[in-house]
Image: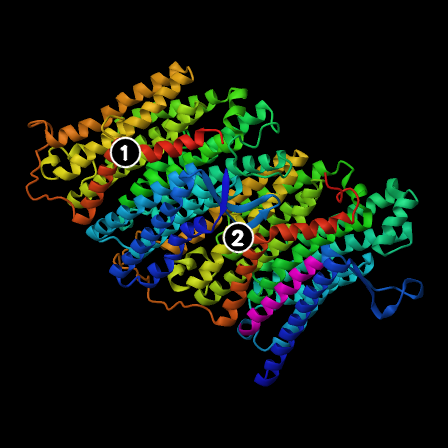
Amino acid sequence: MQAGSLRLCLKLALGATAFSLWCGVSLLIQVAGDGPVEYFLGNWREPFGVGIQFRIDLLNALVLVAISSVAFLTAIYSTRLVREETRGKEALFYSLYLLQVTGLSGMTITADAFNLFVLLEVASLTGYGLIAMGASRRGTLAAFNYVIMGTIGASFYLIGVGYLYIKTGALNMIEIRAIIAESGLASDRMIHVAFILMTIGVWIKMAFFPLYGWLPNAYTYSPSSTGALIAPLTTKVSVYVMIRILLSVFGADYALRRRTGGVVVWLAVIAILAGSILALAQTEFKRMLCYLIVAEVGYMVGGVWLENRMGVLGAVYHIVSDAAMTLCLFLAAGIIIRQTGGYGYAKFDRLFRRMPVTMAAFCVGAFSMIGIPPTCGFFSKWYLIQGAIEAGRWEYVAALLISSLINAILFFKVIEIAFFGAKPAEGHDHGHGDHGHGGGEKIVEAPGSMLFPLLCAAALILFIGIFNTQIADLIGRALDAFPVVGTAK
Amino acid sequence: MDAIHSAAPLWACLASLLAVVPIVALGRWPNLREGATFLAAGAKFAIVASMLPLVLDGKVIEFTLFQAAPNAALAFRVDAFGIFFALIASILWIPTTLYAIGYMRGLGEHSQTRFFAFFAVSLSATLGVAFAANLLTLYIFYEMLSLATFPLVVPPRRQGILPGARFYLGHLLGTSVGFALPALIYCYVKTGGGSLDFSLDGFLAGHVSRGESVALLLLFAFGFSKAGLMPFHSWLPNAMVAPTPVSALLHAVAVVKVGVFCIVRVVTGVFGVDLLDEFDLGAVLGWVAAFTVIVSSLIALSQDNLKRRLAFSTIGQLAYIVLGIALLTPMGVKGSILHIGAHAFGKITLFFCAGAIFVATGKKYISQMAGLGKAMPVTFAAFFIGSLSVIGLPPTGGFLSKFQLVLGTMEAHQIGLLVVYLVSTVLNAAYFLPIVFRAFFPPAGAGAAPFSWRNVKEAPVACVAPICFTALCAIALFFFPAIGQKLAAMMVAAP
């Protein structure tokens, strides 16, 4: 690709994502002030065709801001990486990248269950492409695996929507809920089936244990800038979709008051523990992060099915905070892989001295995953555990704490290597002064265009943590719109 | 009680945290770098001391940083107990810095910049705990302290490196996240998302049943495992691989005292003495502590490594403090608070001595120290004074605090616990005094070849001067106990 058109391409991508960030933030401000915003695309209302309706309340405005922030930061981050990792395919990369962001944002703000499927497919198909784009052949295989699993998930969801349409004749989320409530369909078997199919569909999409098989390889072997976009967003948006279906389509009283919670919380407990333990078994840093995503999905699913306000609030807060943490860690991982040329833990050898800025940001992300205040990871657990104690779900409390401890082991294993060196027994310790350095390789900090997004992500983690009261307050107001979970005790 | 709003507690905390910047920047010029540490230590002490008159005047100093959760802010509140602890920690940082210079340079230690930088961060976290206004703030700084001391627990010259540091962090984080955090959140939920602020009568009264209280009390007592209650004590002996200045200030004063400080805060500020008395829970905590007192003293007897013996002695002395608070009587609480101070000066002296011996001779086993007293008279004289203070004999501050603790057991009619204190005193004497005795009067011709100490001199002045200072302080606490007594009395007296 020619240098001139590449530069234009970068500018377009940066401009587009910056604009969507600006829109996201101003929407959040508007919604927080004046209440939900509705918009019919092309002003085509329901009776005249398939209405494409967007409806933005506080819940999805928050998620939208998270999406657009991640997209913007990763776009900056990718400007140099794309030329290295996907040489000659820059235009393709950015087309898919922007479509991916479109799909995810659309899923978040749509008010229509069928449109959601379409946008889900937009996001998924572009995701497959982005993952397969890397140089590694394992990435291609992983993408193929993901295509199959993702398609199954999307089909489950679509069939569920079909059943709902047959029964209610509506696709608009709020209408469906109103019809179910008015016509007493709540005990209808077909609605149950639709509910189960749609839930399992999104579970596959979010890699809820044991439906996580596609995730680790797909994220590990994708190009770094793809990983930093997809890993923080795809699973989190799917969690949001799940919450949206539960609250807006079926209604919290339908979805959460059927004693299904007991089973699902146990599934979440298993997801958390299994994800953490599998992460322990990994020998590569990025793969370890992927298994942690599986554990974090367990946090959120469990939080939602605690069936109380605090649990759902914690889950939504965790969507935002986990997006920031995952972004920070994947950005750091990408930088480290680029600068050191490898995936293994040993590559972290004394990185604190060689790449102090990267490692400082990395530590913020790691502390957040462990749950050390005042990072946002601590406050996620703070809200989720409160919900669990209120609900009396001690197994979930225990799972959260165990996962924190396992995260501490995982990350301190890395921090230790980065701080003290991988092989302390070896003679290359100079012993005197503070400027010991191992080996002769030149490992230096990444360029500013990669460090800047990383530092922003680290700052976001602290910001979300420090202002957790305000964010929780916004989420609380969002939940007030829904009966059952909305009523504070 | 009058409250004054002032940022002084924040600055007291930040003084050492901000010092990290010049310490790292001046890494290439050790003298300037240590100058920055001294400057920070002086500033920190001055700020803390400037708050003392106000607190003695019966006022509290408050400062809120930000709202961390509904009704629970990250906030500072300086009261008598907090300032007492902060004074001890900040005054001892000054001699420790001097000592560290002598020690680290004497041994040609690696990574000195890292050492001084993280030392400064640890002091910030310690003051944060001392000034914490509520349970959440306390917990946040408690965790910060665990993390900040992690890079310090590295053995000299990296022999047999990290298992110590790993064990250290794993143990401290494991217990605080596993026990203290759920207890904290449980309190928050039970009080209906209410305030977690410490108050003189506690805030849990009326919110929890007796069974819940037992569980919460034990979760807190074991969760704040920096206090070293058995069976969660083993991180401390393992942390002794660290350079001696770390063992001295952090693992005899700052870190471990933060542990007991947290437990004292939980007993007095969260439960309230009255609630625990009503549920009759003092005995539960008391016997856990009593067990630790006796068992750790017995283990200390069998340790030949001087620093490990000191570590087990510390575990016992920390349990003294917890035992005192568990008596739930005014005298017991007062004794506990005073003992935090008395033990700090005594034990830091002992560690300084152990380090000085190591710098001068390279010896760390007690069996190798026979006859050493003639070569290092000042060090061993100080060691003797430190021992007296820890055993609780006059003329040292340890006598006064232990006396009050014993009075507390009588006030509480706990004769069993009185016996524990007395037996433990005998054990303390049994594991300390022979060291001094054998140093000055080596058993003639006994055992291995008698060492010739003719070439051995005292450690560098930078090591010996702090030893003299802290030893004199330990004595001064006996003759001038007024400030400590007054602050401790303020904690006990109802407002």
The location of residue B349, given as percent across then percent down, is 24, 38
A467 drawn magenta: no
Residue for point 31% across, 44% down: B91
B129 left or right of A470 in image: left
The answer to whether B53 is drawn above or below residue A340 in the figure is: above
Classify residue B197 as left or right of residue A53: left
| Residue positioned 87% across, 45% down in the render | A190
Same-subunit check for callouts 2 and 1: no
The subunit carrying tag 2 is A
User: Is the stretch drawn in magenta largely helix, strand or loop?
Assistant: helix
The amino acid sitting under disc 1 is Phe
* Residue B114 seen from this side: yes
* Residue A380 screen position, x and y as percent: 60, 47
Q: Residue at x 44, y 37 (%)?
A: B58
Magenta residues? Answer: A61-80
Residue A278, horizontal then vertical, whole percent: 55, 46
Q: Which residue is mark 2?
A: A288
**Local secondary structure at mark 1:** loop
Q: Which residue is mark 1?
A: B480
Q: Quadrant of residue B465?
A: top left
